[in-house]
Amino acid sequence: MTGEVTYDGAAEAEVIRGEARGDLPEPRGAATGGCHAGAAEMEAAARMAGKSEILDQYAADYPQGPHDKPQSMCPAFGSLRVGLRMRRTATVLSGSACCVYGLTFVSHFYGARRSVGYVPFNSETLVTGKLFEDIREAVHDLADPDKYDAIVVTNLCVPTASGVPLRLLPREIDGVRIVGIDVPGFGIPTHAEAKDVLAGAMLKYAREEIMAGPVQAPAAGKSDRPTVTLLGEMFPADPVMIGAMLGPMGLAAGPVVPCREWRELYAALDCGAVAAIHPFYTAAMREFDAAGRPIVGSAPVGHDGTAAWLAAIGDAFSVPAAQVGAAQNAFLPAIRAALDAKRIKGTITLSGYEGSELLVARLLIESGADVPYVGTACPKTVQSAADRDWLEAKGVKVRFRASLEDDLAAMEAIRPDLAIGTTPVVQKAKELGVPALYFTNLISARPLMGPAGAGSLAEVVTAAIANKGRMDEMRQFFEGVGHEDTAGVWEGAPNLRPDFRAQHQKKLDKQAKAAKAAEMI
């Protein structure tokens, strides 16, 4: 595409003012309750402000479970992290200052090395539509083709609930692509799925560019073999290992989505098939479906997983059985040897919100561990069916959209030798004297694919299980210092005041009844 889309500033400004002023009902959750309003109120406000279509799409793409709120970090962290990892891409947030502060803090904590743009607002600019005009002005000021290929603008909860219409931003300014997305905590359950929101939006934009005419070739050049696009963030060594396993079949590993630069999106779409390593990238898979690319679930993890995955990839590319067998014979013995060399003994419960929990569970079981429970905050999808079926055949209880309560209940009932999970699960396990490991930093940040992944978990898992004696010593050392309200060392009895607590609970119950009655009106 060249040039900027046709744009009538005066007409657009009037549309924005009309949407926010009164042509649609005033956004109650955003204008009066701010980000302290409940999720239901925020969603109702967003729908009244014209966001029903996108919220309905999110509900279809990311169906929630029995619990009605995210139990991971703010979902927008996922999409923010994807944008910050892309070269020549600027990121702008629109949301409450406290949210923006928290998101940028966590992003830089995780290694972001660039600034995050922020368009502040107050009640007046939010309600009058001036916020949108401020966003548009900021985008125009930022759009420098010498610096950027794209600018990502993200609405957080309050602007989404208020109906700030990023769809009316110019599609392109001086050759810089403008990608606007809504990532509200009340519409997207986990930060892992928010990665898919931005990845899908970028793939859609890139696919439309391809349909319009010639596009840039990848910086590394085009492969002379058919490629497999890898869907989902993974350890840097895993794509290399996957490429090695594809070699005997005459195939190559393509880009990893989310991509690191814009032109990789074209290469990702120009593939022979897509490997849904993380099976919850629904929006991204929709774009690959539209491009006519077949999608293969699961991953080359462990002996059984690698054998089945190579066969499925071979089917997708119509690779002769002899070549598929050659690839399997080249790597399966090495995987089996690595699994046998580093055995894991013990019972492990596993939970997380990254999307690779089922793959890790398969690897642990093939390494010798007993894994009776796997919980993932991500949803059940067609692409996760093979992993689910394999685990359930081994007697594993697999819980999709698992809540924190599900994970804690499983860990407390099983009392495993090791609990792998999110921060609160690890905290509770250690309180009980159960060795525990944080999934995100200590498990998912390791190679999982092929021979390299086969023995990668054994050392850290075995070492953690061996810490049981230290956990018992710590419990004995801290025995008697109190728990929860009585935590600490007291010279006298703690002043708990159950009467105050009962009085406050009555107020909460009264507010809940009033809110329920209001919903029925």
Image: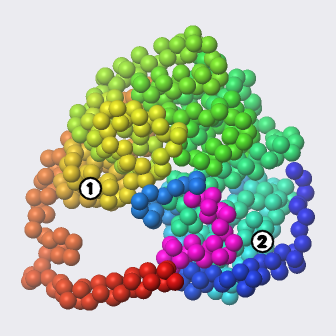
Query: Closer to the N terminus: mark 1 or mark 2?
Result: 2
Q: Specify whether residue 395 is painted magenta.
A: no
Q: Which three-letter amino acid code belongs to the residue tagged 1?
A: Ala
Q: Residue at x 33, y 88 (%)?
A: 507
Question: Where residue 211 sits in the image (x, y, percent)?
Answer: 83, 43
Q: Nearer the viewer, mark 1 or mark 2?
A: 1
Q: Specify whether residue 53 is painted magenta.
A: yes
Q: Which three-letter amino acid code belongs to the residue tagged 2?
A: Arg
> Visible in this render: residue 84?
no
Mark number displayed over residue 136: 2
Q: Give the residue pinned by disc 1.
A: 409
**Which type of secondary structure does the marked residue at label 2 adopt?**
helix
Q: For marks 1 and 2, give the CA distance.
A: 48 Å
Question: Where residue 261 sits in the image (x, y, percent)?
Answer: 69, 46
Q: Which residues are magenta?
A: 36-59
Question: Where residue 302 sits in the image (x, y, percent)?
Answer: 41, 28
Q: Nearer the viewer, residue 356 or 28?
A: 28
Q: Residue at x 65, y 62 (%)?
A: 54
* Image position of 414 (left or right of 438): left
**Which type of secondary structure does the marked residue at label 1 adopt?**
helix
Residue 24 vertical position relative to residue 61 in the rendered view, above or below: below
